[in-house]
Amino acid sequence: MGEFVRLEVDDGVGVIRIDRPPANAIDLRVGVELGETVREAEERSDVGALVVWGGRSR
C-alpha cells in the first residue's frame, strides 16, 4: 500500500481510502497509488464492490 492510499475490505466491500490532508488532492503520486490500489482490489477474490473515500479514518 502507498503512503496516501490504502485498501480496507469488510464483508466483500473494498474501501479505497485517500488520506492526504488537508484537501485530499489527487496529484501524480496519489494517482499512481490509486491505480495500484485498484489493481490490488481487482486481484482479490474477497472484493465484490469498491468505494473510494476521501475522509479521515476514525
Image (cartoon, rainbow, N blue to C red):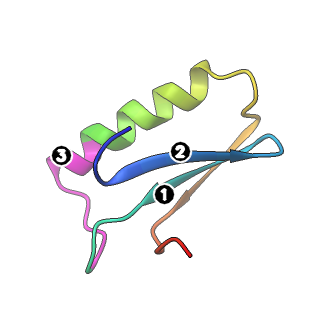
Which-is-in-front pick, marks 3 and 2?
Answer: 2
- Residue at image coords 37%, 64%: 19
SS at badge 2: strand
Label 2 crowding class (10 Å Cα cut-off): few <14, some 14-19, many 20+? some
Give me the residue at 16% from left, 47% from top: 28
Horizontal side of 12 relative to 39 (left or right) equals: right
Q: Which mark is residue 17?
A: 1
Which residue shows up at 28% across the image and 49% down it? 3
Which amino acid, by three-letter code, is at mark 2? Leu
30 drawn magenta: yes
Give 58 or 27, whichever is nearer the viewer: 58
Is residue 17 positioned above or below 20 on the image? Answer: above
The image quadrant of residue 26 is bottom left
Q: Is residue 32 left or right of residue 37?
A: left
Residue 38 lies, with reference to residue 16, above or below; the image says above
Q: Residue lying furthest front in this view?
A: 58
Proximity of marks 1 and 2: CB atoms separated by less than 8 Å: yes
Query: Rounded to the nearest whole Å, what is the CA distance between mark 3 and mark 2?
Result: 16 Å
| Side (left or right) of 31 relative to 6 | left
x then y, percent, for residue 49: 72, 42
Q: What residue would you read off at disc 2?
A: 7
**Contact? badges 3 and 2 (CB < 8 Å):** no
Q: Quadrant of residue 41?
A: top right
Distance between mark 1 and mark 3 Cα atoms = 15 Å
Distance from disc 1 to disc 2, alpha carbons, whole Å, reads 6 Å
Residue 25 highlighted magenta (yes or no): yes
In the rendered image, residue 39, in percent from the top left (x then y), is placed at: 47, 26
Q: Which of marks 2 and 1 precedes in the sequence?
A: 2
The mark nearer the N terminus, 1 or 3, is: 1
Please provide the residue range marked out in magenta: 23-31
